[in-house]
Image (spheres, helix red, strand yellow):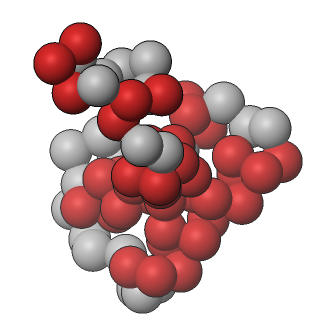
């Protein structure tokens, strides 16, 4: 398998832009077992992870009850 010639930042941006356009996560164009696939996936999911990190545990739906 040939590594991507695109930088990890560019691949992550591709994932974020795909999410912004409303593309499904299955639109990831890279082979599933590649580092590029994982980087694109992280870019796509980043807004969710940033929102979770910025939201206090007391109001997060995914927080365990003891976190309140």
Left or right: residue 57 compared with residue 45: left
The residue most toward the right is 21
Q: Residue at x 69, y 46 (%)?
A: 19
Q: Is residue 31 above or below residue 17?
A: above
Q: Is residue 12 above or below residue 54?
A: below
Q: Residue at x 23, y 13 (%)?
A: 65
Query: On the rendered image, what quadrant is the N terminus found in?
Result: bottom left
Most foreground residue, 61 or 17: 61
Count of marks, rendered view:
0
Asked if one can make out residue 49 in the rendered structure from this viewpoint, the answer is no
The residue most toward the front is 68
Place of residue 62 in the rendered image (x, y in percent of width and height, measured from the top left): 36, 20
Q: Residue at x 21, y 44 (%)?
A: 33
Place of residue 26 in the rendered image (x, y in percent of width and height, measured from the top left): 55, 30
Q: Is residue 20 above or below residue 68?
A: below
Query: On the rendered image, what quadrant is the C terminus found in?
Result: top left
Place of residue 6 in the rendered image (x, y in percent of width and height, measured from the top left): 46, 84
Q: Residue at x 74, y 37 (%)?
A: 23
Most foreground residue, 10 or 50: 50
Place of residue 35 in the rendered image (x, y in percent of width and height, measured from the top left): 24, 61
Asked if one can make out residue 55 in the rendered structure from this viewpoint, the answer is yes
The residue most toward the top is 65
């Amino acid at each position: 398998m040939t590594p991507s010639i695109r930088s990890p930042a560019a691949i992550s941006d591709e994932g974020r832009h795909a999410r912004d356009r409303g593309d499904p996560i299955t639109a990831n164009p890279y082979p599933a077992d590649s580092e590029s696939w994982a980087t694109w996936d992280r870019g796509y999911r980043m807004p969710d992870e940033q929102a979770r990190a910025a939201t206090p545990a007391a109001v997060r739906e995914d927080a365990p009850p003891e976190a309140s």
